[in-house]
Amino acid sequence: QEYTALKLKVLEWAPQAAEALKGKIPEDASVYLCPATLRPETMYGQVCCFVGPSLSYGVFKASEKEYFVITDRAARNMAYQGIFEKDGVPEKAADIQGSDLIGTLVNAPLSFHPQVRVLPMESVLATKGTGVVTSVPSDSPDDYAMVTELAKKADFYGIKKEWAELEITPIIQTPTSDLLAPYLVKKLKIASPKDAKQLLEAKELAYKEGFYQGVMKVGDFKGEKVEVAKPKVREHLIKKGEAFAYSEPENKVVSRSG
Ligand code: ZZB
């Protein structure tokens, strides 16, 4: 699976994170949360960044002045892809729990909301990508269901309501909608992030329609088909040093007979 890993620079740590990281990272270093995405063309619509509150993350040294917050598993993969200055063994500067990252303020490259918060999402998998997920509710049904839930139950989730209420801007026009994810969530009567089966269906529909029939409504490649714009947005982000290529071996089921 070939992902685009984005660099969301930490602007202000949540108090618990600041406490956990005290003295472990050089003062003058930049730290980035690095979500892995298959939809770089949607980055204009980022409204927050998800971590799994019960997952463990590491802060890894990518170079003298840059550190990445990702899972240990992602760091091991990255160490063999020339992503870190030192090849082979990832150098971990600190451990941090996902729950401690909640509330951290980060810069989201390309987004209409350049400053977004780190928020919790229980369904983030430790076994996929980097364990960090950037949230685009306009085009990802999972993200739309989650931010809706977070805004509804902000106190329960221990966040400020306004962190989950950033405006959702149309990014891609398709034959059905320019806000495909909210449209599908309503159409499939998805009530919460717990409706996993319908969310999976909505995700598949959104991928297909977005990729094959979508046209960029905003950004540097406005008016171009998503198919065409996707690699261009990716290259643009990588050139600016705001993203990098990250691939991981697919978890293929190998059949004995086959
Ligand atoms: C931004 C984005 C915008 C995404 C969109 C999707 C969509 P997939 O589709 O299941 O193979 N993701 C990445 N890592 C994780 C993780 N560890 N746990 C849970 N979700 C994760 O996985 C790729 C997508 O799933 C990624 O692309 C990321 O969300 C999320 F408009 O990044 B995406 C219709 C989907 N639209």
Image (tube, rainbow, N blue to C red):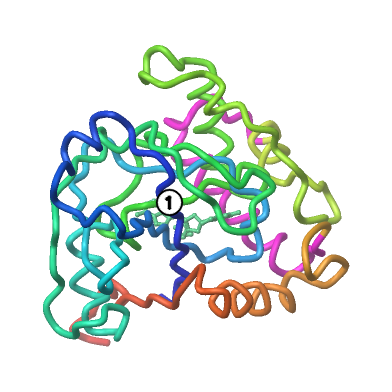
Residue 244 image offset from top left, x and y in percent: 45, 75
Q: Residue at x 26, y 53 (%)?
A: 27
Q: Compare residues 87 and 54 and report the one nearer the observer.
A: 87
**Image quarter in which the C terminus is found:** bottom left
Residue at the spot of label 1: 133
Q: Does the closest atom of ligand 1 sit within 8 Å of the Cβ of label 1?
A: yes
Q: Residue at x 56, y 22 (%)?
A: 162
What is the magenta range? 188-216
Question: Is residue 227 left or right of 31 when viewed as pictured?
Answer: right
Asked whether 63 falls inside the magenta stretch, the response is no
Q: Residues within 10 Å of mark 1 (few under 14, many from 20)?
A: many
* Residue 93 falls in image quadrant: bottom left
Q: Residue at x 21, y 50 (%)?
A: 57
Is the residue 228 above or below the residue 129 in the image?
below
Residue 184 image offset from top left, x and y in percent: 68, 41
Q: Magenta region, mostly helix, strand or loop?
A: helix
